[in-house]
Image: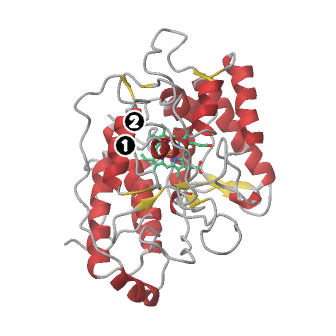
Amino acid sequence: MVQIFSSKKTLACAIVALSVTPALAFPASYSSLGGLSDLELRELMPKLKPVIPPAPPGPLAFTGAKLVDDKKHPWQRQGKDDIRGTCPGLNTLASHGYLPRDGVATPEQIIKAVQEGFNMENRLARFTTYAAHLLDGNPITDLLSIGQKTRRTGPDPPSPAIVGGISNHGTFEGDASMTRGDAFDGDNHSFNQTLFDQFKDFSDRFGGGFYNLTVAAELRFQRIQQSIATNPEFSLFGLRHLTAYAEATFPATFFVDGRRTAPGEAGHLDMTSAESFFKGMRYPKGFFRPAAPVGTENVPAIFTAHPVQPGKNVGGVNTFTVDESLGSILDGCTFYTQFVNTTIRGLYPNPTGVLRRNLNLNLKFFYESSGAGEECPQVFPYGRD
Ligand code: HEM
């Protein structure tokens, strides 16, 4: 069972760093409301259709391996108005119709899809989804987008992507991704061939041509060192400290066919399959999901191989300084408490009405997904209903 908390300050596991989300220039029903002024909220809220967020789905009834590249879920190329983003898992699920193909979904749909399509363990699925929804979703309409449109539609010539949803930098999306550049370098969401070549090179050098947990530990460390040395605004604290390590384990577990369970096969991702997920947003032909639910059980191994404390560059490149103010993978309770009281409250300082009610419901779902016990009580920044 995934526990992001422990009674001691041991490794906590879960899923990214934090600042105010900019409002999209043309708000859609799924655009984040975080960071809007009271005036903007007053103007926008009457135009949105309020939804009461339902309780999150439970675990799958059947949790074994299963063909997921099936006839009911054919891959389709991204349409010009479809949204894709920084997450190869969610991109793949949208391209196969496990998620709405336009890339806009409710938390309920996302939790069901990651379980069905990748056998993600229920608590991790809930934790990740509600963290993303609170940071980047629309709490009134209960919708979240999995990234950005490739280009604007309309009479004008194609223009740069409208970055939004989970691709918003500094919310869930963060620096030192394995196959995406840092926001400081101009594109934090597109597949980056140079970085993927590094992914393959590390798989050759440390995994005999396969991506596994040994490779994950080395590549995670390498990407952090690269960003410290090249990105003056590099940050890796709070949620990003958790997600950077967790996501590095995902390709070695979720992207390996569930029939490959023999020693030397399990946890070993071949490069053709890796390219299919990261670049093609597509299951390899005839892909089976993992044979058992997968959570964050592999995260401690890759963190302890090269532990980097939470922190950020404070005065240009190569000025990485430890910053524990928002908690980290090492301190789940500080992470949880600061996430709610500082980050979410920073995005929504003074919610009222339906917005307050729905934020409270989502915060409850988030707390319940964390596995916290009495040692880390729920916090109520907007009061108890
Ligand atoms: C449960 C809902 C999920 C949400 C909300 C989510 C969200 C995200 C986000 C925002 C990122 C970008 C973080 C960054 O590197 O800056 C990301 C990265 C990633 N996600 Fe997901 N994700 C989810 C589920 C999954 C699943 C099921 C898989 C695998 C099947 C997956 C695999 C990955 C991987 C491998 C990366 C790292 C990409 C890279 O570093 O280049 N995610 N995810």
Q: Amino acid at mark 1?
A: Ala
Q: Of 366 and 56, which appears nearest the observer?
A: 56
Q: Is mark 2 within 8 Å of ligand 1?
A: yes
Q: Residue at x 47, y 63 (%)?
A: 136
Residue placed at 43% from the left, 64% from the top?
A: 137
Q: Residue at x 37, y 32 (%)?
A: 119
Residue 44, how many percent across, how many down? 41, 84
Q: Amino acid at mark 2?
A: Gly
Q: Position of residue 51 (x, y in %)?
A: 26, 69
Disc 2: which residue: 117
* Closer to the camera in the image, 239 or 379: 239
| 260 shown above or below 306 | above
Q: Residue furthest front?
A: 155
Q: Which residue is mark 1?
A: 113
Instruction: Give how far apart the Cα atoms at labels 2 and 1 are.
Output: 6 Å
Left or right, 328 with reference to 118: right
Kind of element beneath mark 1:
helix
Q: Mark 1: few, some, or many residues within 10 Å (few <14, many ≥20)?
A: many
Local packing at callout 2 (Cα closer than 10 Å; few below 14, some 14-19, many 20+) is many
Q: Are marks 2 and 1 in contact (CB under 8 Å)?
A: yes
> Residue at the left extreme?
385
Colouring scheme applied when the structure was drawn: secondary structure
Residue 198 falls in which quadrant of the image? top right
Judge whether 360 appears above or below 6 on screen: below
Q: Give SS at disc 2.
A: helix
Quadrant assignment, res 12:
top left
Query: Quarter holding the N terminus?
Result: top left
Judging depth in this view, the residue of 375 and 351 nearest the camera is: 351
Residue 303 visible, this angle: no
Q: Position of residue 354 (x, y in %)?
A: 27, 77
Drawn side of residue 130 relative to residue 271, left or right:
left
